[in-house]
Image (cartoon, rainbow, N blue to C red):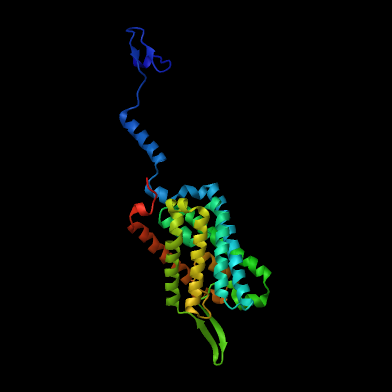
Amino acid sequence: MAGNVEFIGDDVENGYNANRIQPFATPKSEQRLIVGEKEKEQHPSKWNKMLGLQELVSVNVWRASLAELLGTAVLVFSLDTIVISSLQTDTKTPNLIIALLVVIIITILLLATFPISGGHINPIITFSAALTGLCSITRAVIYIFAQCVGGIVGALALKAVVNSSMEDTYSLGGCTVTIVTPGEDGPVVIGLGTTQALWLEIICSFIFLFASILMAFDHRQSKSLGQVSVFIIVGTVLGFLVFISTTLTAQKGYSGAGLNPARCLGPAIVRGGHLWDDHWVFWAGPAIGCVAFALYTKLIPREHFHTYA
């Protein structure tokens, strides 16, 4: 009987007929099931890859988010300090000085954070990366959370080094659409219309992604130009948009296109008050711009966006 046959190794000889008896084989249906499970483990589904839930417990992702947190904190502290200093010193062309310094700061921070986290330091970049499939949704949420915390840390650091009168005058360099000033007949609201400010955020966010971030997303471009060149281009485009949005409107009370929701969030939480007025514009505008950019990348030929095989 087969049940009384003793197997040694892979096969044994039957003493009665000297024929080799093979060990019990796995049924073909079970073999296909095992192979299918292995393929699923090696090639996760599109939804699993897009969600990236396994990154929620990834130590490396959370450690990389620290670079996003610190990078955003330094960005908020530096930019808001520049804004306050330029206005405080009564510079004739503060918009131009701010724009030039934005180029330098962004380039330096990208060089510092890119090897660790990819150098996002901006929810616009992270959200657009998630929409275009270059970053999982889970990692995007972690990064954006870290960037928002970084914005708050940067605003707290700025609050610690400026006096109360300067804080009141410049609102920690926060993002504003309108402000209330005293007038002859009582308080007067000055600034930009909400609709106009929203359109500026949408357009500037899309241009920012189209004219610079697209190069960083495209491996062909970043490889041919070099990382440093791409970082300089990103900083230059961002500085140009800051200059245009503040100069073109020329409206007192309007701080210009935010182009970084985390930077706007930090001073709003720390300072509060009128910084919350129309604060949603600095989130909704970039979000719409990111969606428009993602649609654009889906419409253009793939070989113009992805690397060649």
Quadrant including the C terminus: top left
In screen coordinates, is 266 left or right of 213? right
Please name whichever residue, 293 or 5, is drawn nearer the observer in this view of the structure. 293
User: Where is residue 113 shown, x and y percent of the image?
Assistant: 56, 54
214 to 99, vertically: above or below = above
3 to 161, vertically: above or below = above
| Number of numbered callouts drawn | 0
Quadrant including the N terminus: top left
Q: Residue furthest top?
A: 16
User: Where is residue 174 shown, x and y percent of the image?
Assistant: 56, 72
State whether residue 258 appears in this view.
no
User: Where is residue 159 shown, x and y percent of the image?
Assistant: 65, 69
Q: Residue at x 43, y 62 (%)?
A: 211
Please name whichever residue, 294 or 144, is drawn nearer the observer in this view of the structure. 294
User: Where is residue 57 shown, x and y percent of the image?
Assistant: 52, 48
Where on the picture, by quarter, is residue 32? top left
Q: Residue at x 59, y 69 (%)?
A: 80
Q: Residue at x 33, y 58 (%)?
A: 299
Please name whichever residue, 89 or 138, is drawn nearer the observer in this view of the structure. 89
State whether residue 154 appears in this view.
yes
